[in-house]
Image (spheres, coloured by chain):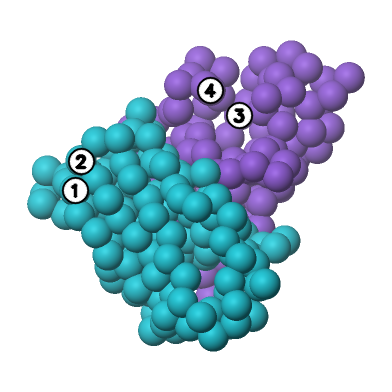
Chain colours: A purple, B cyan
């Protein structure tokens, strides 16, 4: 069974940092590009960042560029999102998602909540 | 960024009746390979999103055939032929043609 399990969310002060992790299982992780998508409380979905199969290419939405860094460890089947200079606007559930070979996401984790507050 | 605009944002429907959601993109979504990467996701309350439709009109495995997607150019739609209680949730269109991939605002489907 394909499974994505996020962790690392929690409460962080404005201006602080946090690292999210996503553990993948049930498929050959190294063959798929991976993404982070977020959803602010009661709001819609936003693509945050993406990474190619070998980590050689990374992509960011403008609102996180320079503050967030996506990475992966194919030997451990792990995806990461290092987040810095966090603001209240970054407060959201962060989902890990697998990129399907057709411009889409075909599998999502359950999400991890990031709360930014003093 | 490509803007995806959905309408309506709220859709009260009677059980057994049809429902339709529109999604308009701010630019054409044909990729260089000739495909149009428009998708539809369902998010039930308290759950992660689930893909229903990919590449405009292809239904995912396990998705009931009462769901259908159509469209071209900049206008796309999701139709539910007969709404059932389990269809309650928020529906999002999404384009995967150009980075950043972008979503519509979401349409909340509820039972009247």
Instruction: Please give the name of the residue rendered at 44% of the width and 48% of the height, measured from the top-left corner.
Output: B6
Position of residue A31 in the picture relative to residue B74 (left or right): right
Secondary structure beneath label 2: loop
Depth check, front residue: B82 or A26: B82
Mark sitting earlier along the chain (1/2): 2
Mark 4 belongs to chain: A
Asked whether the viewer can see residue B110, the reply is yes
Q: Is label 2 or label 4 in front?
A: 2
Q: Which residue is mark 2?
A: B28
Give the CA separation, mark 1 to mark 3. 37 Å
Please say if B103 is above or below B76. Answer: above
Q: Is label 3 or label 4 in front?
A: 4
Instruction: Mark 1 vs mark 2: tell me if same chain.
Output: yes
Mark 1 belongs to chain: B
Secondary structure beneath label 4: loop
The percent coordinates of residue A42 (x first, y second) are 70, 45
Instruction: Please give the name of the residue rendered at 72% of the width and 42% of the height, measured from the top-left corner.
Output: A41
- Of the numbered discs in the image, which one, if any, rests on residue B73? 1
Depth check, front residue: A115 or B66: B66
Instruction: Mark 1 vs mark 4: tell me if same chain.
Output: no
The reply to whether callout 1 and callout 2 are in contact (CB within 8 Å) is yes
Q: Which residue is mark 3?
A: A82
- Of the numbered discs in the image, which one, if any, rests on residue A104? none
Characterize the local packing of mark 3: few (<14), some (14-19) or many (20 or more) Cα atoms within 10 angstroms: some
Mark 3 belongs to chain: A
Q: Which residue is mark 4?
A: A64
Give the CA separation, mark 2 to mark 3. 33 Å
Give the CA separation, mark 2 to mark 4. 26 Å
Instruction: Please give the name of the residue rendered at 51% of the width and 80% of the height, measured from the top-left corner.
Output: B17
Instruction: Please give the name of the residue rendered at 20% of the width and 55% of the height, measured from the top-left corner.
Output: B72
Q: Is label 1 or label 4 in front?
A: 1
């Amino acid at each position: 069974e394909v499974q994505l399990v996020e962790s690392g969310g929690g409460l962080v002060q404005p201006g602080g940092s946090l690292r999210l992790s996503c553990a993948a299982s049930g498929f050959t992780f190294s063959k798929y590009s991976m993404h982070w998508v977020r959803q602010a409380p009661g709001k819609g979905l936003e693509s945050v960042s993406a990474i190619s199969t070998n980590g050689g290419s990374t992509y960011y939405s403008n609102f996180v560029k320079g503050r967030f860094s996506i990475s992966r460890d194919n030997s451990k089947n792990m995806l990461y999102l290092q987040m810095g200079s966090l603001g209240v606007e970054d407060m959201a559930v962060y989902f890990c998602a697998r990129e399907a070979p057709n411009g889409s996401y075909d599998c999502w984790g359950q999400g991890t909540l990031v709360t930014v507050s003093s | 960024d490509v803007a995806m605009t959905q309408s309506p944002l709220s859709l009260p429907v009677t059980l057994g009746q049809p429902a339709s959601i529109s999604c308009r993109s701010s630019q054409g979504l044909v990729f260089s390979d000739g495909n149009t990467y428009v998708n539809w996701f369902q998010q039930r309350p308290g759950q992660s999103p689930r893909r229903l439709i990919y590449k405009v009109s292809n239904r995912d495995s396990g998705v009931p055939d009462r769901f259908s997607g159509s469209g071209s150019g900049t206008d796309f739609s999701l139709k539910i032929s007969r709404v059932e209680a389990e269809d309650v949730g928020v529906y999002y269109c999404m384009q995967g043609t150009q980075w950043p991939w972008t979503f519509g605002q979401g349409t909340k489907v509820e039972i009247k």
